[in-house]
Each structure stands twice: as C-alpha cells, then as structure tokens.
Amino acid sequence: MNPADFTELAPGTLATAAQGFLCFVPNPLPPPTLHLGMSAIHTLAQAERALGKLAGSGEMLPNPHLLIGPFVRREAVLSSRIEGTIASEEDLVLFRVDPEVENRTPDTLEVQNYVSALEFGLKRIKDLPVSLRLLRELHSRLLKGVRGADKSPGEFRNRQNYIAAGGVPIQDARFVPPPVPEMKQALEAFEKFLQAPSERPFLVDPTAARGTTDLDQALAVPERVLRATPRRIC
C-alpha cells in the first residue's frame, strides 16, 4: 500500500504485519467525541426529517413492503455496480417472474441475492439485533449459488486477503485489511459499539462504525474475487 494514500482523516493507521507487509488497522471503537459543524447538523436534521416522512407514509399503507420494495431493488442495483456486478431493476423483476431469465444475464442472480438478503435482514432484526451473527446470516444468502459459494459463506475469513490486480503480490496491493487477530478484535468492538446505549443521533453511529470496520474484507470472500473486482474500502 502507498502510505501517501492515507491522510490524517483516515479512520485507522497503517501497521506492519508479522509477515512484513503493510496493512490497515482501524481505530478502536467507540470513536472519540464527535464535533459536528452547523452544516453537518443541518444535513442530519434534513435526513431525519425525510426518514420520518417515509415512516409516516409506510404506516398509511396496508402493505409497507410496497413502499420499501423499489428502494431495496434500487439499492441492490447501485451497490452491486460498485462491486463490478451489473444488472438492471428490470432484470430483477423479470427474474422474479421467471428465474430462467438469469441465464441471459449472469449477474442478475448476484443482485437478486442482495435483494433477498436485505429483505431477510429487515425481517430478522425483529427477533435478532444487529450483530455478527446477523451479518454472517446475511452473507450466506449473498453468496448462495454465485461466485464464492464454495468459500465458506456466512463465515469470517481465517486468512489474509487484499485488493490488487491479478498477479500483484500483497506487498504492492492497493489495500490490505487487518490480519485475522486484529480483524476479530475490531469485529468484537464493532458489535459492542452497535449494541451499547448511545446518546448520539441514530444516523451517526452506523456512519462512525462503518468508518472503522470493513465488513467486506472481514467476511470470507475469495481472494480471486477481491483481486479481480473493485470493492468498497471503508
């Protein structure tokens, strides 16, 4: 990794692993006291107001899923594009009508898994809080029948991975997440942070947590996928 790519605003530091390569280690949770400027406070108020309107609209519908469904599909399509997986909302609708359509659009099943995982999560959090267990359950659904299905779906990784072009050694990788022991410590702190009482606005905590925990790199994603596909870096 290039140390120059990491500014003082990065939510972590670079460290040298026992094997000699540089890796990124996130800052500990909870984060230090957050000082929000007036612009951030204004944006936060607008977001909370918009969510309140959305919640109110949902309560007026006999089936709130009619309102949530299109947002879930759009989120799945846009987020999957970041991963290099391309499918349209029309592809998802056609896939639900006839799954054989997937044969003509290979990426559609991956995006449909994203939708299925989101829908499962929305139901699951009624009985199970946001936790490492829930994340593993979601991950197992994301990889069902697609790339990485044979690489321990629903499990956290037990070896080092990294992001680079094919054939590039880890020493020249674009990004190297924490080694496994540090990853486990970060995940445990992440879970405790999410479940602990907080006086911060509810939109702030997930943002702060995502800045210090890279779940993409914690879950057991195949190295070939990591090296060949652009992935999100927290």
Image (spheres, rainbow, N blue to C red):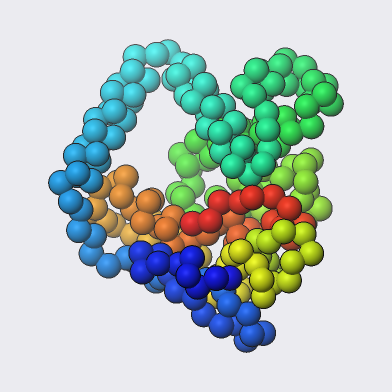
Q: Residue at x 35, y 64 (%)?
A: 9
- Please, which residue is most extreme toward the front here? 4
Tell me where residue 158 appears, x and y as whole percent: 69, 70
Q: Measured along the vertical axis of the image, is residue 149 above or below residue 196?
A: above
Q: Is residue 46 visible?
A: yes
Q: Is residue 184 visible?
A: no
Q: Residue at x 56, y 33 (%)?
A: 78
Q: Observer-nearest residue: 234 or 70?
A: 234
Q: Residue at x 47, y 70 (%)?
A: 4
Tell me where residue 122 appears, x and y as whole percent: 50, 36
Toward which corner of the image does residue 211 lie, by quadrant? Answer: bottom left
Toward which corner of the image does residue 190 lie, by quadrant? Answer: bottom left
- Please, which residue is most extreme toward the left here? 38
Tell me where residue 98 appears, x and y as whole percent: 77, 17
- Determine whether, in the image, residue 231 is placed left or right of residue 202: right
Q: Residue at x 32, y 65 (%)?
A: 31
Q: Measured along the vertical axis of the image, is residue 118 above or below residue 175?
A: above
Quarter of the image with the N terminus is: bottom right
Tell me where residue 30 appears, x and y as whole percent: 34, 66
Q: Observer-nearest residue: 232 or 131?
A: 232
The mark total stands at 0
